[in-house]
């Protein structure tokens, strides 16, 4: 295995101390009815207990979410209180990249020497997302109301276009074949159900109970509700909403949370159930492409990251991405030459949905688990963020 420079040489992700909720689709579970910040804090406490990590070990909390939730002003300290452990911390937000940025910022906190154990917690609830009212003194309409999820996905104020339009424009630029896009979606769903049936997903996803304010059960989140088996024929028959984009080849809104720890090397060995597994931060890159060409941006971020580290795609043991459109994966192959069939072996956001904040955190958790099964190697994670930004990060499992 080639050696690459380490981004945060003193920081580690302790194997097996992570966990994610399932991601039920918008309005399909009891998560639609609760304060997602409170639920995330309580769920992190539950996951830490299952992983046999005392809450008292945590010194700091980095949280990430993108959709306003009740009492969001109080951010990490409030979520920590819901977890049952009074911690300082802060909140980060960068659209779909939030889940990865929060992990990287946790690494920076440890590398600075100020903390030995940082909890990273990401979450979002697209269900019943709030509507904001904004005074606009320079507009004809003096007061404007914006539905946080739907209006933002339907309108990029920098271009005047919807996100789905960006997928269509980029598909036309790279002359993407609709048949290949359907094949991507079919294979991604097939791999998800294979991972589920093998028990792989049960190792990283945690069933969680949802309680009301009186502590009574509202429901149990124990499945990626909304995911269904697809046939290639059914995908072929779907109407195009834009070039190479159909209802079956794009992701869907969902709710959920995901958490992991970032620690010093010594603490990682002490807290992990498998202290011999060493997970290091290698590098990160972000790029911005031209307006409305979002699906190409992650590929450019990966190219920049490989250039900085001196590695190649063939050096990767696991490659996994946030792919809101199946066309993203085809475009990645066209730019890098890397076969999309080698990616996303246990599922991906195209299949199990897109709650935004925790999306890339779950992607990372699944990828690290897969790399450990393979005996280690480099793990490449990448995705898009709001409009035309791409992010990529490298980790090494030994």
Image (cartoon, helix red, strand yellow):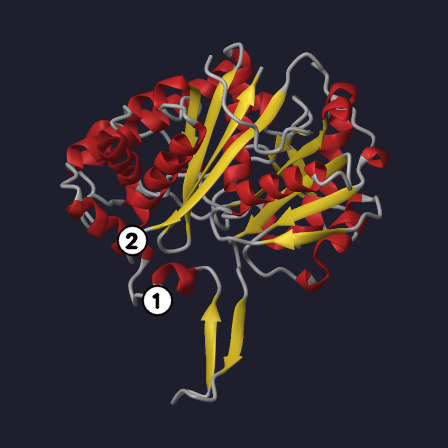
Horizontal and vertical percent for residue 298?
A: 36, 41
Compared across the picture, whether 161 is left or right of 29 comes to left
Query: Dot 1: within a 10 Å radius of its alpha carbon, few (fewer than 14), some, or many (20 or more) residues?
Result: few
Label 1 element class: loop
Q: Earlier in the sequence, mark 1 or mark 2?
A: 1
Horizontal and vertical percent for residue 145?
A: 47, 76
**Image quarter of residue 12:** top right
Compared across the picture, whether 200 is left or right of 296 comes to right
Q: Which one is closest to the eye, mark 1 or mark 2?
A: 1
Q: Which mark is residue 252?
A: none
Residue closer to the observer: 231 or 98: 98
Label 2 element class: helix
**Image quarter of residue 271:** top right
Residue beneath disc 1: 158
Give the answer, above or below, for where 112 lies relative to 54.
below
Q: Which mark is residue 164?
A: 2
Q: Does the image show residue 47?
A: yes
Query: Dot 2: within a 10 Å radius of its alpha carbon, few (fewer than 14), some, or many (20 or more) residues?
Result: many
């Amino acid at each position: 295995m080639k050696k690459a420079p380490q981004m945060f040489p003193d920081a580690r992700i302790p194997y097996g101390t992570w966990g994610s909720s399932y991601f039920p689709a918008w309005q399909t579970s009891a998560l639609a009815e609760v304060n997602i910040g409170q639920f995330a804090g309580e769920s992190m406490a539950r996951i830490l207990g299952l992983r046999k990590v005392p809450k008292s070990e945590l010194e700091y909390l980095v949280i990430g979410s993108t959709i306003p939730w009740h009492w969001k002003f109080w951010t990490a300290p409030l979520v920590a209180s819901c977890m049952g452990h009074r911690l300082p911390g802060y909140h980060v937000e960068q659209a779909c990249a939030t889940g990865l940025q929060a992990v990287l910022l946790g690494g920076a906190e440890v590398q600075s020497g100020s903390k030995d154990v940082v909890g990273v917690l990401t979450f979002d609830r697209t269900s019943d997302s709030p509507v904001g009212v904004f005074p606009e003194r320079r507009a004809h309409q003096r007061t404007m109301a914006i539905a946080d999820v739907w209006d933002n996905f339907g309108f990029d104020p920098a271009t005047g276009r919807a996100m789905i339009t960006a997928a269509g424009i980029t598909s036309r630029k790279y002359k993407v074949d609709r048949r290949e896009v359907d094949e991507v979606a079919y294979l991604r769903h097939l791999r998800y159900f294979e991972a589920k049936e093998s028990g792989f997903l049960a190792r990283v996803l945690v069933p969680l109970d949802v309680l009301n304010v009186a502590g009574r059960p509202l429901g149990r989140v124990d499945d990626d509700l909304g995911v269904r088996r697809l046939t290639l024929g059914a995908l072929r028959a779907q109407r195009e909403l834009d070039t190479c984009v159909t209802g079956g080849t794009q992701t869907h809104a969902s709710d959920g949370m995901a958490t992991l720890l970032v620690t010093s090397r010594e603490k990682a060995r002490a807290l992990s159930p498998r202290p011999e597994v060493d997970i290091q931060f290698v590098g990160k890159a972000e790029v911005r492409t031209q307006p409305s060409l979002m699906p190409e941006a992650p590929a450019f971020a990966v190219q920049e990251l490989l250039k900085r580290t001196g590695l190649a795609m063939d050096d990767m043991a696991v490659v996994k991405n946030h792919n809101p459109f199946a066309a993203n994966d085809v475009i990645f192959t066209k730019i890098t030459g890397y076969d999309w069939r080698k990616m996303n072996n246990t599922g991906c956001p195209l299949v199990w949905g897109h709650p935004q904040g925790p999306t890339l955190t779950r992607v990372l958790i699944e990828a690290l688990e897969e790399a450990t099964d393979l005996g280690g190697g480099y793990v490449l994670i990448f995705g898009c963020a709001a409009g035309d930004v791409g992010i990529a990060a490298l980790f090494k499992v030994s």
